[in-house]
Image (cartoon, grey):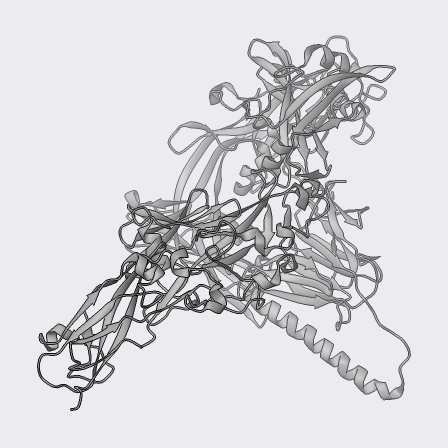
Amino acid sequence: MKKKFYGALLLGSVLLTGGMVSCSDYDDDINSLNDRVAAVEETVKGLQEKINAGCVITSVDPTENGVKVTLSNGESFELLNGAPGAAATVEIGENGNWFINGKDTGKPSRGEKGEQGEPGDSGTAATGKYYKPGENGYWIEVTVGADGKETETETTISWTPEGTMTAVWDSENGKLLVSNVKGYNGILSISLTSELKSLVFQPEFYYQGIEAMEAKTFNYTEKGVKEVNADDDFTTDAPTELDGVAMTPGLVAKYHMNPSSANWKDIKSLSYISDDKNYTRAGGVVKANVFDLEGEEGILTVHSQLTDGTIKDIQNDGKVTVLALQANYSGSEKDTIITSDYAAVKATNYKDMVLANAALGQPVHTMHLYTNAQDAINNAASHEIVWNHEGLDVATLVQTHYDDSQNSHVAWDVTAADKTVEDYGFKYSFELVGYHKGNNRTSESAHAVMKGSLLKPCMPVDGKQPTWDAAEQNKAEKDREPLVRVILTDTVSNKIAAVGYVKFKIVEKATPTESEVILTPEFGFNYEYTVNCTKTEKPLQIEWHDFEEDILAQLEKQGISKEDFHTNFELDGGNDDATQYDGKLATSMSTSKKGIVKQTITDTGAEETQIITWTLKNNEAYQLFKNNKSISVIVRYSKKIEPNVYQFVYVTLTWTPNPRNVQPAGTLENSDKIKNYWYAYNSATPGSGYSDIHANVETVGETNADDEFKSDILNTFDGNNVTVSGVNAVYTAFQDANLTKTFTFVDPQSTDMTPVKGNSGTMYDITVGDNGTTLYANVVNNPLVKQAVVKINGSILEYQGKDNETLYSFARDILNAADHAQFVANNEGKKTFTAQIQINAENCSYVPFELENNEFFAKFLRPITISDPHETNFVDATTGGAKADLKLTFVDWRDHNFDNASVTKGQNYYKYYDVESIAQNGDIMTDLNGTTGVFDRKLSDVTGKVKFTFTDPTKSEIQNGNGIVNHYFGTLNYENNGTTVGDFQIKVPFDVTYDWGTIQVYVICKISQTEAN
């Protein structure tokens, strides 16, 4: 059963604890009860304060503990359960009745006022009736009189299912009612409205720059009518013309209420202050008498009638009539008078009101209804109605025309059903007028019944019109022509302003004059959908019995037989691949297709009927479902009536998967990693965490090793393979064995991994390219020149730049910036180069696979480090000049000293790393004539008499020695200036070049004082 919700109606199941207690427990129980009561009072107080401040309730939702009330400002308040029992719901079904737990109570949720009496007579005793939940837990029966006055009577029937916590959001009556609240005895009532603070006029237009409302004067000739019925003969029925009437202008003014949630029903009375403004105060000021009001969504609409005085006109009188609304408002503490701003009143005249057909697009003067029964009877019927129609609203077919203030003949309303005229004190009424055709003794109008404005064909009973409820329908009604009289009544003066007649023809099926949509059945499917990276097809089929019940049987009610449908209606686009449409209007257009919709014929044994099948491939369905909870297609059957005139049946197919599995995901467990290969972030301790891995060049002495910088990421994973776990079993296509794993770099932009400083001091910006497999570097502020630094080839990290300074100078400069253990920037801002890597898993490229714990860092360790052992020293004035062989310490990324036989094990590390040159490069700094150990001056600036020269070693001498030493690094020569000198030091920069670039090392040399001085 489909249902319409009355605001929001939510309930929560509750828990009640009980049992026997001793006297000693009473104090605790009383204190606990007091605490609960205080908590409820505090919650309600806070909630009510927010509502009084202008907030409105946006939802009432069940929670584990009770009910949560959410306000428009985002705040929420919780009311706790206080009773046992299952959840219950109180809601309004499609028929307008209250439903409890899905069962129709038979009680209407809203009512209309009783029918008004005939013009000149008092209203009838007919009443409307509806029910609302009462604050005592019982239904309130509300009787609505003909004058709109409501009388309330409390029944003995409870709206609260026993033993449940029930919340009813009764927005129409401005209450939130909650039963069985923990800590509260009775029905908790919370007002949904706040107190009115001010009224602001909403102008219809501006009258010479002044906010204004229109005061309409309706000029018409009063009509007199005779009583008619559907059975007797009123062929000559026609209204008589009486006196002319100028209906006192009726005002319809709208005011913004502040706050918008203010309860307009607390307005005890309304009145207007009127005046003539701008020039002089004068007598004869018009009076405005309020006769009706209503409020909706923060707008108060006030209906009033103007009496006495004359509305002033600026052009003719030099004055303007203004009105300010005064509301006598019943507040929580005392009654308050609230006055709106002033608004101008502009008088306009309307005349020659006439009833008309509401045929949009036609010239208005061609649409008028016949003004007497005879003319309507003698001419063709204006409208057709199918013999089994359940109730055609005649109000949707008529409207009123008049001459406006510009003497243009225009439509006043769209149709009578929109009730525009009621805002100005008018109303429509409809009744059947009996007449006989030929020798028929039964009236044509006796073949129909009316209920309000609803017209329904029926069979007479013993030649007389039946009642609405007793009316039976039959195709034998075909060709009968009931006549309806439409009356427009001025309810303010209780006079008839216009009368018109409409004749209908009862037909077996309606004959369209333009293309029309006659049926729009909808079919839903909730089959599970799980993405699986294939083109497997899922057929969704409308069964033959559903086709018969929801299409053929419904067309039968419109006079279209099954045979007619099979023979004359065709599926647009053909039976094998139907055209799909963007809507269900006669003007709807074809749209891109979602799958294929086919029609086949099935033989049930006794008869044949159509079957519709909608087929979607899994990969196509994923593109539709990844961002949508449901998808629909619309196909169309068309019957050609005449050229360019069709009848359409639109069939909507909607798939709402339950469940809808479109987000496969998994995780990389740390247990899948070989712990000893992993490090905590920036840690040098193996096994300390799972954040970092360390990439290095090939190890000296291994088979075929030649100092290449290639590290296989998979070496760090158990079994040398990445294993994805934690994938929901429903995703069979995304289990580990079906996944392809790849490695890519994470973009370092906006992180501390870029820019980086090279060995030379140059700053480089690091970016990602080549689909995430290459890290590039460019000199900061020069993005047009970039070089590759490191690449990922499968699972292999390949650092660039060995033996190629031309193409990879940036990579070499970055690699040699810092020692292999310098994970945090030193005082020069240099550190080991680090990249962030992401592991990706997928089966098909178009389905994102969410993988947790899939990012880590790789640190690229500089192959060698060179340091000064502080053993290159001199003594001043040494005979023959002071000379000292350059002393340097070489270690590799494992801290293996190149000259330590216990670790080199016969391997020539100098040759392996291809240390090819050592050159003095740069200014020699000194502490001579300064602070010891502070090398802040160039030696050449202090004196030109002290000289140092350097004898470069050859590549062979570095790698193999020169006969004197195993590895010779060159010699420094020192010459004195002929004057004795005390101790001082120099700092000499050297560039050491090897197969991965150049490392700059500073050697501090000590010059001891002149011998024997």
Asked whether, in this view, residue 748 is left or right of residue 678, the answer is: left
> Residue 138: image x %, image y %?
79, 59
Q: Residue furthest right?
A: 20
Q: Residue at x 53, y 21 (%)?
A: 368
- Corner quadrant of residue 601: top right
- In percent of width and height, residue 642 lies at 59, 9
Residue at the location (48% across, 53% down)?
255
Q: Nearer the viewer, residue 57 or 580?
A: 580
Above or below residue 564? Residue 716 is below
Give the quarter of the figure containing the C terminus: bottom left
Tell me if residue 967 comes above or below residue 121 in the rendering. below
Name the image quarter holding residue 472.
top right
- Residue drawn where x is 76% and y is 24% of the image: 547
Is 810 on the left-hand or right-hand side of 56? left
Q: Can residue 282 be spotted in the picture?
A: no
Task: From the top left corner, tell me how far across and down residue 777 is, in percent.
Answer: 35, 51
- Of 499 and 534, nearer the camera is 534
Give the position of the N terminus as an image quadrant: top right
Query: Residue 681 placed where, x, y %?
Result: 51, 66
Which quarter of the figure has residue 869? bottom left
- The answer to whether residue 963 is seen in the rendering is yes
Could you say which is closer to the camera, residue 875 or residue 988? 875
